[in-house]
Amino acid sequence: RVIFNGNGYTDEWIAEAEKRGLYNLKTTPDALPHFLDDKNVELFTKHQIFTKEELSSRYEIWLETYSKIINIESNTMVEMVQKDFLPSVFEYVDKLANTAISKKAVISDISTETEGRLIKELTELSGEIEKGIDSLKADTAKAKAVDDVLGCAKAYQTDVLSDMETLRKAVDTAESLIPDALLPY
């Protein structure tokens, strides 16, 4: 019987696990190669659960599945941001600009500082988002072109997921500035 009442994600536990010689494998591409460790192959073959070939086949299928899922998520993210989110940013910038113009038309010396600040911030964020999309597209294409299943999975893990996180942060920041009525989701 095993009872664990702690938090397996704290820095203290990670240090303790390392001290005990336990793995700290945070991602699928980090963990799956250990499926083919000699001791694991011996265990599965000894008990006639899998042959060595079946283990290798499953290993490759799991890595390919991982890569395909990240590829789909990456392409979906690009499509959603390009086709749906950025147009809502531009629509709000247009509304802000028209509001500033309308205010000045009524009262020439009225402040449009708020509108100007929001336009500037959203324009800068849309630039970041465009760069993020370009980077994500390029790294997704590079990862997809890797022939080795582990290398491909690692490319998705390190480059594509990192690009997705960077893009998500820029989109989240812009989203917080746009009225809900203009957001597509």
Image (cartoon, grey):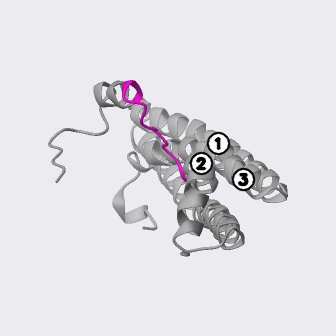
Residue at image location 68% in from the left, 47% down from the top: 154
Q: Position of residue 34 (x, y in %)?
A: 58, 50
> What residue is shown with label 3?
150
Task: State the residue in front, 109 or 167.
Answer: 167
Q: Nearer the viewer, residue 149 or 103?
A: 149
Do labels 2 and 3 touch, CB within 8 Å? no
The percent position of residue 162, horizontal first and vertical second, equals: 60, 42
Report the side of 153 relative to 138 (left or right): left
Q: Amino acid at mark 3?
A: Leu
- Secondary structure of the residue carrying numbered label 3: helix
Please give the range of residues in magenta.
Answer: 18-28
- The secondary structure making up most of the magenta span is loop
Is residue 123 visible from the viewing direction of this image?
yes
Label disc, if present, on residue 161 of the rendered structure: 2
Q: Is residue 95 magenta?
A: no
- Amino acid tagged 2: Leu
| Marks 1 and 2 in Cβ contact (< 8 Å) | yes
Q: Are marks 1 and 3 in contact (CB under 8 Å)?
A: no
Foreground label between 2 and 3 = 3
